[in-house]
Image (cartoon, rainbow, N blue to C red):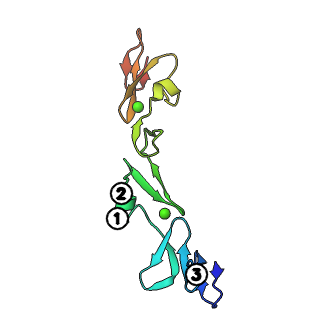
């Protein structure tokens, strides 16, 4: 927080003077915006719920509000892409995060999921591949 020379307290903001120093204003920190009712108070921006043009970059799946900014997260089975916004399927078979049996099962990647199917020579029984 920051105090102006006239004693005004800026909350979540820095006090700055205009060019000729006649007027001081509170300038919100990054990730904050002016409170509707109070020029000297700034409140965190929730980009996940704020519907204004500057923050119109939507997350593919979930939006998590942080200050400053926000994070996009992806549903289970998906990975966040390099654009930090869109989500792609996680290939559990490729990355080894599946739980298929190495010996009797084959991993088959699916969008948002994966399946274990019986390897050649194994039969699908009620207790797994035998
Ligand atoms: Ca935020
Ligand atoms: Ca997958």
Q: From the viewer's perspective, is 3 left or right of 88?
A: right
Which residue is tagged 2? Answer: 56
The circle drawn on residue 52 is 1
Which residue is tagged 3? Answer: 20
| Image point (39%, 34%), residue name | 113
- Which mark sits nearer the N-terminus, 2 or 3? 3
| Closer to the camera in the image, 123 or 57 | 57
Give the quarter the ligand 2 occupies. top left
Q: In this view, does 102 lie above or below 112?
A: above
Mark 2 touching mark 3, by CB under 8 A? Answer: no
Mark 1 touching mark 2, by CB under 8 A? Answer: yes
Q: Residue 45: x, y in percent?
A: 46, 68
| Image point (52%, 31%), residue name | 97
Q: Residue 107: x, y in percent?
A: 43, 22
Q: How far apart are marks 3 and 1 (CA)?
A: 33 Å
Q: Distance between the residues labelled 2 and 3?
A: 36 Å
Q: Which of marks 3 and 1 is in front?
A: 3
């Amino acid at each position: 927080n920051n105090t102006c020379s006239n004693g005004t307290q800026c909350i979540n903001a820095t006090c700055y003077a205009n060019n000729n120093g006649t007027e001081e204003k509170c300038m919100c920190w990054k990730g904050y915006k002016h409170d509707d009712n109070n020029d000297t108070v700034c409140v965190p921006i929730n980009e996940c719920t704020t519907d204004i043009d500057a923050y119109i970059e939507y997350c593919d799946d979930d939006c998590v509000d942080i200050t400053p900014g926000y994070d996009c997260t992806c549903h289970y089975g998906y990975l966040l892409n390099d654009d930090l916004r869109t989500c792609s399927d996680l290939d559990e078979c490729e990355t080894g995060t599946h739980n298929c049996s190495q010996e009797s099962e084959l991993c088959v990647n699916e969008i948002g999921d994966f399946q274990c199917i019986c390897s050649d020579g194994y039969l699908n029984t009620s207790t797994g591949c035998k």
